[in-house]
């Protein structure tokens, strides 16, 4: 697919879409209806914006310095922002908002549109709730499913700081900002973007450094790492990414073997995979550390019952394999009188002795 401009439109009244899709006729004068996929190399897994659907529109109020002045993904950009509801109520105003473009640090509407702004350009962006605060809104000032009008001016763009040169305090602050953004997405039930933010925070914490950190800073960085890994595991569990969640839990437990959240989530992951025998002792360990935790109590009780049911099913299956399919329907008293009530270990032991006796007889006969 290639980029096209709607024919017959003047500069400043453009409609951008994907070749092969109609929709220019619905564009109002002076508005761009944005419809494009971000490249797969984007650090933020944003979604397609359908051309012509009117969910995200941009109108240039003040022209910028040209296409070559547009910011690049990964750069730190500074914008002037004013956000209003459809009735004109101002819900956010920031004279100098700075964020990393493509890291999902801000609304998706901003992350999408700022990369199309020229330096010094002022634009009006009208966005559907889908690319703002969604179905949940932002209490108390932004109601659910609220569209926003964003007035944005691109003030500056520069390369992000070198992580190796950040002080301990700067690295902690940066990682915490990404983690908090992940928490925001988690609360919005957008677990894919939450995982993205936690991953970025972990990359910051784990990056090499040319600066010496104090013991307190090292401890604080570890604390941020553990929080991110725990939250990452929670997000992965929501998406049924059990293998990844188990890995995140194990990484936490490498640093903190008694971390209750990691133990609990590891037990849940194993239970989801049907590994009840492995999950139960892990949940018991978590319960021992926090005996009053009702959530762990409930999960453990549920797993113990499931494990017992699983063992009963396996026992019946073994009985059928050994040629006694009717054993399951026999009453308890009859079971006690049947030879099948003999413990399996005695049955196998007797068989082994019998086979050994036959083998010994053959050997003696051969010698004679």
Image (tube, rainbow, N blue to C red):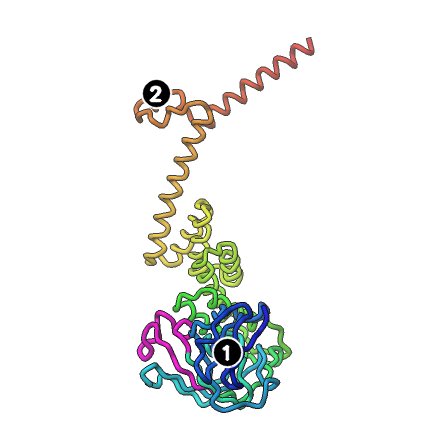
Residue 163 spot, x, y in % from top left: 60, 78
**Is disc 2 placed on a helix, strand or loop?**
helix
123 is higher (above) or lower (below) than 207: below
The residue labelled by disc 2 is: 337
68 is higher (above) or lower (below) than 135: below
Tell which of 29 and 289 is nearer to you: 29
52 is higher (above) or lower (below) than 275: below
Is residue 169 visible to us here? no
Tell which of 174 and 5 is nearer to you: 5
Callout 1: few (<14), some (14-19), or many (20+) C-alpha neighbours within 10 Å?
many
Residue 290 spot, x, y in % from top left: 37, 59
Say which mark, if any, is on residue 15. Answer: 1
Magenta-colored stretch includes residue 140: yes
Say which mark, if any, is on residue 150. Answer: none
274 is higher (above) or lower (below) than 69: above
User: Which residue lies at the image location 46% right of the left edge and 88% below the top edge?
Assistant: 80
Is residue 65 visible to us here? yes
Q: Are marks 2 and 1 in contact (CB under 8 Å)?
A: no
Q: Marks 2 and 1, how far apart in space?
A: 85 Å
Per the rendered image, the range of residues in magenta is 127-152
Residue 357 spot, x, y in % from top left: 57, 16
Magenta-colored stretch includes residue 284: no
**Is disc 1 placed on a helix, strand or loop?**
loop
User: Which residue lies at the image location 45% right of the left edge and 23% below the top edge?
Assistant: 323
């Amino acid at each position: 697919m290639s980029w096209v401009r709607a024919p017959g439109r003047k500069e400043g009244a453009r409609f951008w879409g994907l070749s092969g899709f109609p929709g220019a006729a619905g564009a109002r004068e002076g508005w761009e209806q944005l419809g494009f996929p971000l490249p797969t190399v984007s650090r933020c897994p944003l979604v397609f914006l359908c051309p012509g659907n009117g969910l995200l529109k941009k109108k240039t109020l003040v022209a910028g310095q040209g296409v070559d002045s547009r910011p690049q993904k990964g750069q730190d950009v500074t914008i002037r922002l004013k956000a209003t509801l459809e009735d004109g109520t101002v819900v956010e105003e920031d004279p100098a908002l700075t964020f990393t473009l493509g890291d999902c640090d801000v609304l998706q509407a901003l992350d999408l549109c700022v990369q199309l702004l020229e330096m010094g350009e002022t634009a009006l962006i009208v966005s559907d709730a889908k690319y703002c605060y969604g179905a949940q809104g932002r209490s108390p000032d932004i109601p659910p499913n609220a569209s926003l009008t964003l007035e944005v001016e691109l003030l500056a763009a520069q390369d992000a700081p070198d992580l190796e040169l950040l002080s301990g305090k700067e690295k902690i602050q940066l990682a915490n900002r990404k983690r908090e953004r992940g928490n925001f997405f988690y609360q919005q039930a957008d677990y894919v973007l939450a995982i993205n933010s936690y991953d970025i925070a972990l990359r910051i914490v784990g990056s090499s450094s040319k600066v010496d950190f104090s013991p307190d800073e090292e401890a604080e960085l570890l604390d941020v790492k553990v929080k991110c890994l725990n939250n990452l595991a929670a997000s992965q569990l929501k998406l049924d990414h059990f293998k990844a969640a188990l890995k995140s839990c194990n990484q936490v437990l490498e640093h903190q073997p008694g971390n209750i959240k990691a133990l609990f989530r590891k037990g849940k992951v194993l239970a989801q995979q049907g590994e009840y025998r492995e999950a139960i002792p892990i949940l018991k360990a978590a319960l021992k550390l926090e005996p009053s935790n009702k959530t762990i109590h409930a999960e453990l009780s549920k797993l113990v019952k499931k494990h017992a049911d699983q063992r009963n099913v396996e026992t019946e299956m073994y009985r059928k394999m050994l040629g006694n399919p009717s054993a399951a329907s026999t009453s308890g008293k009859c079971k006690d009188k049947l030879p099948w009530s003999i413990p399996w270990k005695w049955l196998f032991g007797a068989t082994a002795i019998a086979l050994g006796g036959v083998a010994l007889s053959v050997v003696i006969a051969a010698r004679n």
